[in-house]
Image (cartoon, coloured by chain):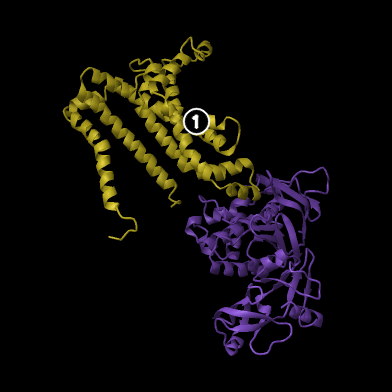
Chain colours: A yellow, B purple
Amino acid sequence: MQRRVLPGFGLTLGFALMYLGLIILLPLAATFVKTAGLSWEQFWSTVTSPRVVASYKLTFGTSFYAALFNVPMGVILAWVLVRYQFPGRRFMDALVDLPFALPTAVAGIALTSIYAKTGWFGQWLEPMGIKVAYTQVGVWVALTFIGLPFVVRTVQPILEELEPELEEAAATLGATRLQTIRRVVIPALLPAIITGFALAFARAVGEYGSVVFISGNMPMKTEITPLLIITKLEQYDYAGATALAVVMLLVSFALLLVIQLVQRYLFRSRA
Amino acid sequence: MSIEVRNVWKHFGDFTALAGVSLKVETGKLTALLGPSGSGKTTLLRIIAGLEFADASDDPDWGRVLFHGEDVSNIPAGKRGVGFVFQHYALFKHMTVFENIAFGLTVRPGSARPSKKAIADRVKELLELVQLEKFGGRLPHQLSGGQRQRVALARALAVQPKVLLLDEPFGALDAQVRKDLRRWLRGLHEKLHVTTVFVTHDQEEALELADEVVVMNQAKIEQIGDPQVVYDRPASPFVIEFLGNVNRLVAGLGKLNISNKDVLYVRPHDVEIRRDHAPEHSLRARVLHVFSAGNYGRVTLQRLTTGEPLEAEVPRDQLRSLNLQQGDEVFVVFRHVRLFPKGQFYETDVKDETATEADISGGI
């Protein structure tokens, strides 16, 4: 073992492992243990019932599109916050964190009241044939709302540290502004963008509070998986609830792992 | 392609970066902008490149940049035909060395863009020029500092600039790499003859590398001239102090009507130490420290009358015969001094002018 200038590797590593074990692994293990109370047939029929499968599609699908939508929006917001000085910039900067801080139920109620038939947006959108509240679109709106800070906050520091010389170099070499953004700026931001996307996606998959108000919770249509888990818990079907939890856990973990691998492959160049 | 800068002013808020600077650089010359940090040299370079713009003025002759007599003041950087090399390389990290060098060619609009093969050939040619033939597939972080700077240079040269501008090109490198790269750049310039302007705060670098040195201080140009001229005939106390070691003494000399406030400058290699006989025009000094390495020994002295420190460079054999010990009192003779009385300045070659010799002795 190499000698280190700063002692304490063993101590801190031990502490980190114990903390992760207590806070994350133990509760997760409990879900698996609880699920093990079901026979394989029971488990399979629980996690593949049509209503549940519909909820997976909605949850993962809308989470994906919400996170995807937040990528360009978040990058533009970060760009404006980093690159320009204007009155109200700090206020705008603080506003970005609001979806983090707001109790999600409050967000859900606020969104619902805006997009309901009589709400500020709803009264204009409804006559145009666009229904948001109590539809899958509503779910997407809520997930977009809560996911935004993740992209902004991961891209912002990278953009701040991006040397202006890179863009100047591109300019002296004759690149247009658009070429500079496409070929120099975006590639430099891409790792942060993917991280932000993954965080927003992961957050959206687990979201409950804001969605249940705006979705209307119609079976097969606007039920998200976390809602089904709660429903099962309310019916004292603990094993059934944890079975769904296990599926979500595995899918989320697999997706995050894939994102991680993609990122590592794409950016193997940057040690 | 010659460069001309006319009456350029530049303010950043309350800070004056350039105060009416004018400059001409002839075609094919290698010119150094030399000065301490904050002297405005980088700002001037960036204005020539079009990365910064001079303060606007109604007078058509103010704040102009001309390339070959043509006004380019309002032309953006990408259309000026300049190659710019940054102190910290500014390589595109996600692109290979090849892609970095090709960048300027690949961003050209369809009709002006060379074919893939032509681009590859050109990049190969440049890789050879900067002696990195085998590194085309590497990424910037796999290269050393000196290699990165050469890639940056190749990238700038790829678009065949008419003017090459380098901002502290060796500033971030080790002393040895710096020296090698400096010599290499000089050779490259001899080969390509592209009009080149580089910024540096290192006087040795400027003197060794440049055909012409522009010494800048506090937003203004202090002196323009070839290295020999700025070193041997500095136009101001700033220039003499900035270029190399120099002793600064309060003159206090009689007959020339020089008051005590006037300042006398003498380079360490123009200071001669004598032990035994005391010529008329010598100073008395005490030896504080003797350091000898290489061909020259450095002797730190203290002038007896005023206590001012004085440094001398003495050839080694002479040092040996002098056999100086700490605390010895010796006589000091100046071969060549420069005086800067009250704003104006004149120089004296001590040995040639008997009047001055007498004056100096009178002051002791």
B292 is higher (above) or lower (below) than A68: below
Residue B292 x %, y %: 55, 81
Viewer-side residue, A113 vs A134: A113
Location of residue B242 with respect to A129 vertically, above or below:
below
Within the image, what quadrant is residue B349 found in? bottom right
Is residue B245 visible in the rendered image? The answer is yes
Apparent side of residue B148 relative to residue A133 in the rendered image (left or right) = right
Q: Nearer the viewer, residue B364 or B342?
A: B364
* Subunit under mark 1: A
State which quadrant residue B188 falls in: bottom right
Report which residue position mark 1 lands on. Answer: A94
On screen, residue A39 versus residue B46, left or right, reads: left
- Can residue B81 be seen by looking at this rendering? no
- Mark 1 belongs to which amino acid? Ala
Q: Residue at x 45, y 51 (%)?
A: A270
Residue in view at x 62 percent, y 82 percent: B314
For disc 1, the neighbor class at 10 Å (few under 14, some 14 to 19, many from 20) is: few
Count of numbered badges drawn on the protein: 1
* Position of residue B169 measured from the top left corner of the image (x, y, whole percent): 61, 60
